[in-house]
Amino acid sequence: AVNPDRVFMRLEMVPRVDTDTDAGYARRYYELFNARYFEFVKDEQFEPYVSESAYARGAQAPSGLRYFFDGTERNMAIARAAVVEYATTWAEFNQMASPLSADESEAISVRDALIRRVAADESPDNANRELVFGKETFERTKAVL
């Protein structure tokens, strides 16, 4: 359910592999987000956003947080801490990453481009984006993805 009177937060670390077939990768990169995930589940001030789109639900990363909440000082501080945690973790992952071969890098680039294209085409939020930005701007920005 969309609620325009509340803040919407979407955070996730998009996997570079299929986590359904690589449990080690899922543990290594996503297990550390479990505590934060369950904190949000328990906090009644944060309303989970569950998409009506089977694609969107299936595409959510194991670290995914999608919530509506009132923009109170308390809630904004909690959301800010989550954003900082995700950004810091992402930066640390990048610093620790091993160099990829040209072939590996190309394969990941192709996969990432495909994910962005499918997400742009299939997003259940496309109607909202078109409404907010207008048809022409929406189509132009969608094409860039």
Image: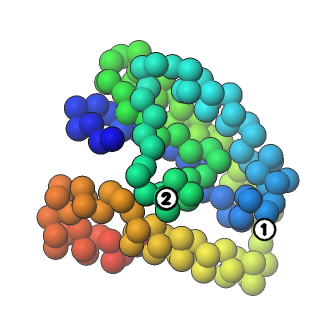
> Can residue 45 be seen in the rendering of this structure?
yes
In the rendered image, residue 106, in percent from the top left (x then y), is placed at 67, 82
- 8 above or below 60? above
Horizontal side, residue 139 vs residue 111: left or right: left
In the rendered image, residue 49, in percent from the top left (x then y), is placed at 43, 40
136 and 87: which one is in front?
A: 136
Q: Given the image, on which type of amino acid does mark 1 rest?
A: Pro
Quadrant showing the C terminus: bottom left
Q: CA distance from mark 2 to mark 1?
A: 35 Å
Residue located farthest toward the top when viewing the structure as drawn = 74
Horizontal side, residue 86 vs residue 127: left or right: right
Circle number at residue 9 = none
Give the colouring mode of the picture: rainbow
Which residue is drawn at the image coordinates 74% and 48% (left, top)?
A: 29
Among the two numbered marks 2 and 1 on one chain, the one whose residue lies closer to the N terminus? 2
Which residue is drawn at the image coordinates 51% and 19% (left, top)?
A: 43
Q: Which residue is mark 1?
A: 99
Which of label 2 and label 1 is nearer to you?
A: 2
Mark 2, secondary structure of its residue: helix
Q: Residues within 10 Å of mark 1 (few under 14, many from 20)?
A: few
- In the picture, residue 74 is in which quadrant? top left
Assess whether mark 1 and mark 2 are in contact (beta carbons under 8 angstroms).
Answer: no
Which residue is drawn at the image coordinates 30% and 62% (left, top)?
A: 126
In the rendered image, residue 31, in percent from the top left (x then y), is placed at 75, 40
Q: Which residue is mark 2?
A: 54
Quadrant showing the N terminus: top left
Residue located farthest toward the right when viewing the structure as drawn = 24
